[in-house]
């Protein structure tokens, strides 16, 4: 096959042009989109997670003897003893277990509150 003959007029090449050179807001739009995306990411992902972690930390600090709690493993029991890192739970008559304080998932409602 023979190459096609070219005419004498030169065609402008797209090789040297940037992809955004054709749009009127090319560089400016890109500079505005990045902070906008970071702001949306912060408000939709990071901020709610920080708020939830703060609530969990406050709940763990407010634990006291006699509270009924649920662990992350699903065990429900009453706090009988506490240290800075451990919690002793009474899960049945004469059955006590030690659980890391950080594994307490939530305070459980007492039976009277559940019925109401």
Image (cartoon, rainbow, N blue to C red):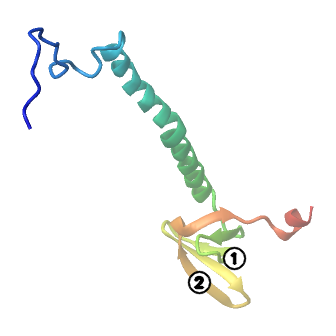
* Image quadrant in which you'd find residue 51: top right
5 lies left or right of 115: left
| 60 to 1, vertically: above or below | below
| 32 to 1, vertically: above or below | above
In the depicted view, which residue is nearer to us: 27 or 35?
Answer: 27
Q: Residue at the spot x=49%, y=65% of the render? A: 84
**Residue where numbered disc 2 is placed:** 97
User: SS class of the residue under badge 2?
Assistant: strand
What's the mark number on residue 10?
Answer: none
User: SS class of the residue under badge 1?
Assistant: strand
In the depicted view, which residue is nearer to us: 105 or 39?
Answer: 39
Sequence-wise, which precedes: disc 2 or disc 1? Answer: 1
Q: How many marks?
A: 2
In the depicted view, which residue is nearer to us: 104 or 42?
Answer: 42
- Quadrant of image for the C terminus: bottom right
Q: Residue at the spot x=85%, y=70% of the render? A: 111
Q: Residue at the spot x=46%, y=29% of the render? A: 39
On the image, the x and y values in percent for residue 20 come to 29, 19
86 lies left or right of 92: left
| 112 to 10, vertically: above or below | below
42 lies left or right of 14: right
Label 2: few (<14), some (14–19) or many (≥20) C-alpha neighbours in 10 Å:
some
Q: Are marks 2 and 1 in contact (CB under 8 Å)?
A: yes
Label 1: few (<14), some (14–19) or many (≥20) C-alpha neighbours in 10 Å:
many
On the image, the x and y values in percent for residue 61 come to 58, 56
On the image, the x and y values in percent for residue 66 come to 72, 70
| 69 to 88, vertically: above or below | above
Task: Find the residue positioned furthest to the front.
Answer: 1
**Residue where numbered disc 1 is placed:** 77
* Image quadrant in which you'd find residue 60: bottom right
82 lies left or right of 111: left
On the image, the x and y values in percent for residue 47 come to 52, 39
């Amino acid at each position: 096959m023979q190459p096609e003959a070219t005419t004498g007029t030169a065609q402008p090449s797209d090789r040297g042009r940037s992809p955004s050179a054709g749009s009127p807001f090319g560089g400016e739009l890109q500079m505005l989109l990045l902070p906008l995306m970071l702001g949306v990411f912060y408000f939709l992902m990071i901020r709610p997670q920080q708020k939830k972690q703060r609530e969990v930390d406050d709940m763990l600090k407010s634990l006291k003897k006699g509270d009924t709690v649920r662990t992350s493993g699903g065990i429900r029991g009453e706090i009988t003893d506490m240290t800075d890192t451990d919690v002793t739970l009474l899960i049945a008559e004469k059955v006590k277990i030690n659980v890391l304080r950080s594994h307490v998932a939530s305070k459980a409602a007492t039976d009277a509150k559940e019925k109401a």
